[in-house]
Amino acid sequence: MSEKLSIVLFSGTVDKLMAASVLASGAAAMQKEVTIFATFYGLFALRKGDWKQNRRVSKDFEEYGAQFLQAMEAKKAPSWLETLQTAIDIGNVKVKACGLTMDLLSIKLEDLEPIVSEIVGVAHFIEEASDGQIIFL
């Protein structure tokens, strides 16, 4: 079994962000090395403060979106950002931003939440991820 988990985060919806953060947290607790490569809409979600207003849910699950978000609030579940920060605190978890998307959208590292550690190209990510498990969200 691989000791590395790489997550390609190309969605900025709360359900996918929560899934990525929970997977990262579980893998970190198992002492796996985790890299999240944020690109396209996943990168939008990492802009400073965006998580506070983001109530978007994937089209496939939009009929459950309001119920999902209400249940999280009622149970005082931590946000996906808090869960991801906890994963970073407990293990070897890195969040990396896609350089091409950053260039295309004129986003700078300082525009993103501080959980993002660096900007990398897709070739760097693929090389780094090639000997582990890869999940697309």
Image (cartoon, rainbow, N blue to C red):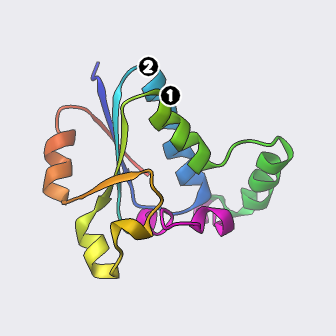
User: Which residue appears farthest toward the right when viewing the image?
Assistant: 74
Give the magenta range.
Answer: 41-60
Residue 123 spot, x, y in % from top left:
13, 55
Q: Is residue 11 visible?
A: yes
* Front position in the image: 6 or 64: 6
Residue 7 spot, x, y in % from top left:
36, 45
Position of residue 117 relative to residue 66, above or below, is above
| Callouts 2 and 1 close, C-beta under 8 Å | yes
> Is 77 within the magenta?
no
Residue that mark 1 sits on? 26
Which quadrant holds residue 76?
A: top right
Q: Is residue 24 visible?
A: no
Secondary structure type for disc 2: loop
Position of residue 14 relative to residue 2, above or below, is below
Residue 72 spot, x, y in % from top left:
77, 47
Residue that mark 2 sits on? 30
Residue at position x 49%, y 45% in the image: 20
